[in-house]
């Protein structure tokens, strides 16, 4: 027996037989994705192009544009985003991943143009708008500058850097507290100054041209003042001029700090008092609950409407995770705020707006829940509430709504997809474009502009004109018909009728659907066991407006529905099938009953209960004709949830054998399908080769979570437990399976696993043809008596439609170059190049008028508010050109240069005669460490006077009247010498010069010795090479002779 199996296995050809499914026929891929992807983690928004980007934990990025345009980007790396930001109106999206890789996405081409790999850990990422420069902050406190070069897009490292020692000051040790968390270019001087905020709380204003910090606040002094250790967690500007920055901390505190907005920060800072005291502290309750501030966003508006959005950390149990605070020039001591209460914690937020040309501009606040759902608020209602909440008649609280697919009031519980209609008269692409524009957008920013959609509904004249018919059954009992010929759902018909006289929804979830387009028959089954048989009138129907919108269908289906018949069975309906010859309907239920119904009555012909020791439930029923010993027998093949397969007499319902065919280790069955094409919904197989040549002649496929089996129908009829083909699943369990037909009318098997993996296998050999994975797909284990959030169906041509919680749709095509969908390029066209010219004025940073935002926020001391000083303006185009020149030059020595200049080991460093320094020996020693302990103000003045002494001596002859001042300078210079002497340092003119000269002579002598040693080593090496060459020459001469 063992030898026989080896021979049979060796006789099998890899990839199946020659007439079976070939790898060249299949190419499993995602054709398009509609909706919001699951596992969403981060927002990004281009306010000019009106493009919203949502990144996921699986490395996907979904783009939403104007007019229902959508696109899905997938990188090779499965890594979540750490930072996501647009280069506005340039068609570029930058994605910094958790692996510290920077991806450059070309939105127009939807291609990954470049990946830049960082050596350190990125902790801050900022795009300088209106330019191609990027600031990168690292965990060690350093900042680098990148530039995006175009055509093709790629990242270039600039030489300009901002080291920690220069921006933060003297740091005793490198720690996580030195990490750069925020880099904020100053709004009115983006090319001149940038605010750097470190994790330890230090805020530094950096002058780009001078390459130095010109103002600092916060930091360690703040920690000592409030006697509490806290770290920065979030920050944003709170002023259009860049004079105020809001900082959120790990202990829940929120401070507003003053930042100089002019080129002379010292004068402005002195007028504002102490630098280490914030000008305002917002008490919103986060500190009481020790909830870190996860995100801050400030929205500027004219007048009193400017506001700050505050979001607490998502791991907190606080009920006030998200609050909106009115923050403007009229802010009083009492904080005006609004708490937004969502069903779940949030991890990100973004404000999107409608078109600028709209008379009624609508802003929308989007909130990303921790589950991946997106919630929306009308931002105009939030603004209205904050401004009027203290009036006598305050407005109602704004209410959130969750974004989901349009026209779906309830969850999809069952679906059918039909793409093989050969009698269709398909509409033109222009018609689909018009219908697509009339579909409500997924994002709410354009909702108000779409008023009147219901009156522009399509005119339905029959199913034959629909190329891809998608039928969905819902949790409330409704049945919807969609045209899925394009990458969005076009509603064509809604059926809510329950009986001849009842037109209301039943409220009971549908669990099974059967549609026969040839006989115009629709059968539905629900959880209560009710089976409804809908008979449609002959096509074409009388045209009329009947868009499937809530409330639009009352009794307007009379021109479509001919009759509705009902019959009740035991248990929730799981499976249905109709005999092509007898027109009998077979129904399988959750409780294990098999019922056969005459649909003309309808009349229940018989009902048989299939008992099971493991679990009940009939997952599939198939009418077949079994040929045994030359005789034909009409049977009903039944597949149960415990992986059993048996046959019943289709006329009487009696079991034909007491023995069932079942695996030794059964698992939950997913699919039972006959492989001879007798299903009434299968395509026309008249052109296929006769199955008489196949051995065995009639086969039955059974797929479970753990394995897939192929049996002979004859053996099942006889009760013989013989498996012809079998394949076990090792790594992951299967969650869904279906068969399909290729272009050559050959059977194939689609297997979908819980991990998102898809396998295409040949039938009946079960050979693996292709394998791929659907990123973002997850299938969780169902609770008892619950419905799945995921609905999956497929057409006979291998087109999969996967709906996840009414939030997203995957459409997957299996066959190679099978184009069943239209307008894919049109719907995926996100970036609009025409805006580059029309919106050019919006790119240039315009001068802001004085007085738009004059801050009068009161400080802690209760002093009166002071108006904001005059701010400077800049020409963006000229500033960017100048900035490019600055960034091309290294302003600080790089780490490589520093290492090259330090002599670590004489044996590892190359020495040269030019290394010997014979220059000026008058260099003074550096003694800043001790001098820094002195009073900074007095020492600065003394050193400044001392520095001018030499210049005054040169002017002594020309200006004799200055002798008195010169003597004063000498006296103060002497005072410096006395101070140095007191702390153990040498005088200005003492023997330090001689000691330095002696030290330099020793250093030069050591270098000469190193050069001599290296020269000797090189000489020995040269001799060795010469000897080796002579030996090779002698060997070659000897070999030739």
Image (tube, rainbow, N blue to C red):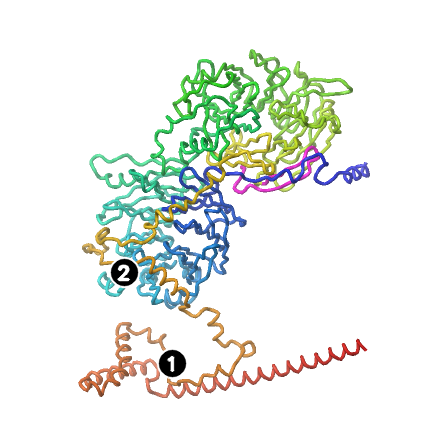
Bounds of the magenta segment: 757-780
Label 2: few (<14), some or many (≥20) within 10 Å?
A: many
Task: Say if residue 223 shows up in the picture.
Answer: no
Q: Residue at x 43, y 70 (%)?
A: 893
Question: Which is more toward the observer, 261 or 104?
Answer: 104
The total number of labels drawn is 2
Horizontal and vertical percent position of residue 651: 66, 14
Horizontal and vertical percent position of residue 32: 51, 38
800 in magenta: no
Which comes before the other along the chain, label 1 or label 2? 2
- Give the image quarter of residue 875: bottom left
Q: Is residue 999 above or below residue 736?
A: below
Tag shown at residue 260: 2
Label 1: few (<14), some or many (≥20) within 10 Å?
A: few
> Spatial distance from mark 1 to mark 2, Cα to Cα?
35 Å
Q: In the shown orientation, is residue 360 left or right of residue 568?
A: left
Question: Which is more toward the observer, 27 or 1011?
Answer: 27
Q: Is residue 871 above or below residue 72?
A: below
Q: In the shown orientation, is residue 249 left or right of residue 301?
A: right
Residue ID for mark 1: 925
Question: Which is more toward the observer, 801 or 924?
Answer: 801
């Amino acid at each position: 027996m063992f030898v026989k199996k080896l021979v049979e296995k060796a006789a099998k050809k890899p990839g199946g037989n020659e007439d079976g499914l070939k790898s060249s026929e299949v190419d499993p891929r995602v054709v398009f994705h509609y909706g919001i992807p699951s596992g969403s983690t981060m927002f990004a928004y281009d306010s000019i192009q009106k493009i919203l980007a949502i990144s996921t934990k699986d490395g996907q990025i979904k783009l939403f544009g104007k007019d229902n345009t959508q696109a899905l980007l997938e990188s090779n790396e499965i890594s979540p985003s750490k930072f996501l930001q647009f280069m506005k109106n340039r068609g570029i999206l930058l994605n910094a991943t958790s692996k510290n890789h920077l991806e450059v996405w070309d939105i127009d081409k939807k291609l990954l143009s470049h990946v830049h790999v960082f050596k350190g850990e990125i902790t801050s990422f900022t795009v300088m708008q209106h330019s191609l420069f990027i600031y990168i902050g690292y965990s060690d406190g350093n900042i680098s500058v990148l530039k995006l070069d175009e055509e093709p897009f790629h990242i270039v490292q600039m030489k300009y850097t901002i080291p920690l020692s220069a921006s933060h000051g003297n740091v005793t040790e490198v720690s996580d507290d030195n990490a750069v968390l925020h880099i904020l270019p100053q709004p009115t001087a983006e090319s001149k100054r940038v605010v750097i905020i470190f994790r330890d709380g230090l805020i530094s204003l950096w002058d780009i041209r001078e390459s130095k910090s010109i103002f600092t606040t916060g930091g360690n002094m703040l920690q000592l003042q409030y006697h509490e250790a806290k770290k920065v967690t979030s920050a944003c500007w709170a002023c259009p001029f860049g004079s105020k920055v809001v900082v959120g901390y790990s202990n829940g505190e929120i401070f507003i700090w003053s930042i100089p907005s002019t080129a002379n920060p010292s004068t402005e800072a002195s007028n504002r008092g102490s630098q280490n005291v914030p000008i305002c502290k917002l008490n919103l309750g986060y500190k009481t609950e020790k909830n870190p501030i996860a995100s801050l966003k400030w929205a500027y508006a004219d007048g009193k409407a400017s506001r700050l959005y505050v979001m607490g950390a998502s791991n907190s149990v606080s009920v006030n995770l998200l609050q909106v605070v009115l923050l403007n020039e009229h802010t009083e001591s009492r904080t005006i705020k609004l708490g937004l209460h969502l069903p779940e914690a949030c991890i990100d937020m973004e404000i999107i707006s409608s078109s600028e040309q709209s008379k009624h501009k609508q802003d929308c606040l989007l909130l990303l829940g921790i589950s991946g759902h997106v919630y929306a608020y009308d931002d105009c209602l939030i603004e209205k509430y904050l401004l009027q909440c203290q009036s006598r008649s305050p407005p109602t609280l704004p209410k959130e709504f969750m974004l989901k697919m349009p026209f779906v009031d309830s969850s999809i519980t069952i679906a059918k997809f039909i793409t093989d209609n050969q009698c269709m008269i398909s509409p033109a692409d222009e018609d689909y474009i018009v219908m697509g524009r009339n579909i409500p957008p997924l994002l709410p920013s354009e909702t108000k502009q779409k008023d009147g959609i219901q009156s522009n509904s399509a005119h339905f004249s029959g199913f034959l004109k629909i190329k891809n018919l998608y039928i969905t059954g819902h949790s409330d009992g409704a049945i919807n018909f969609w045209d899925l010929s394009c990458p969005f759902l076009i509603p064509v018909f809604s059926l809510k009728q329950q009986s001849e006289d009842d037109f209301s929804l039943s409220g009971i979830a549908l669990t099974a659907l059967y549609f026969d387009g040839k006989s115009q028959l629709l059968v539905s089954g629900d959880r209560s066991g009710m089976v409804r048989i809908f008979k449609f009138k002959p096509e074409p129907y009388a045209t009329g407006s009947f868009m499937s919108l809530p409330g639009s269908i009352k009794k307007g289906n009379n021109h479509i529905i001919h009759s509705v018949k009902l019959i009740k069975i035991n248990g929730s309906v799981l499976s249905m099938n109709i005999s092509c010859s007898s027109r009998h309907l077979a129904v399988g239920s959750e409780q294990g009953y098999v019922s056969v119904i005459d649909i003309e009555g309808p009349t229940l012909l018989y009902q048989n209960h299939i008992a099971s020791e493991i679990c009940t439930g009939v997952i599939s029923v198939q009418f077949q004709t079994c040929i045994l010993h030359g005789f034909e027998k009409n049977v009903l093949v039944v597949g149960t949830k415990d992986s059993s397969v048996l046959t019943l007499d289709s006329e009487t319902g009696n079991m034909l054998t007491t023995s069932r065919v079942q695996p030794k280790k059964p698992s939950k069955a997913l699919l039972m399908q006959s492989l001879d094409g007798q299903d009434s919904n299968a395509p026309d197989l008249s052109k296929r080769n006769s199955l008489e040549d196949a051995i065995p002649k009639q086969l039955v496929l059974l797929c479970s979570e753990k394995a897939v089996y192929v049996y002979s129908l004859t053996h099942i009829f006889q009760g013989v437990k013989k498996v012809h083909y079998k394949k076990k699943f090792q790594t992951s369990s299967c969650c869904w399976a279906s068969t399909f037909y290729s272009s050559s009318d050959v059977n194939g098997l689609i297997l979908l696993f819980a991990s998102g993996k898809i396998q295409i296998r040949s039938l009946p050999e079960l050979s693996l043809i292709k394998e791929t994975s659907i990123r973002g797909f997850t299938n969780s284990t169902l609770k008892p008596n619950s419905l799945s959030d995921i609905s999956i169906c497929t057409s006979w041509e291998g087109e999969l439609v996967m709906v996840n919680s009414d939030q997203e749709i995957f459409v997957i095509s299996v066959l190679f170059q099978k184009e069943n969908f239209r307008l894919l390029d049109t719907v995926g066209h996100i970036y609009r190049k025409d805006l580059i010219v029309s919106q050019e004025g919006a790119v240039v940073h315009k001068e802001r008028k004085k007085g738009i935002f004059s801050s009068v926020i009161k400080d802690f001391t209760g002093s009166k508010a002071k108006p904001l000083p005059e701010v400077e303006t800049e020409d963006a185009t000229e500033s960017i050109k100048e900035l490019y020149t600055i960034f091309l030059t290294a302003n600080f020595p790089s780490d490589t240069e520093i290492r090259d200049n330090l002599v670590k080991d004489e044996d590892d460093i190359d020495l040269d005669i030019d290394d010997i320094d014979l220059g000026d020996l008058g260099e003074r020693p550096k003694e800043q460490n001790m001098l820094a302990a002195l009073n900074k103000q007095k020492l600065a003045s003394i050193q400044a006077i001392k520095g001018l002494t030499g210049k005054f001596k040169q002017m002594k002859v020309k200006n004799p009247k200055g002798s008195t001042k010169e003597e004063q300078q000498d006296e103060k210079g002497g005072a410096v010498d006395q101070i140095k002497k007191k702390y153990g340092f040498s005088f200005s003119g003492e023997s330090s010069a001689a000691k330095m000269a002696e030290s330099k002579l020793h250093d030069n002598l050591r270098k000469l010795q190193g050069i001599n040693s290296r020269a000797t080593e090189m000489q020995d090496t040269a001799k060795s090479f010469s000897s080796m060459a002579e030996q090779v020459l002698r060997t070659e001469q000897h070999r030739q002779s």
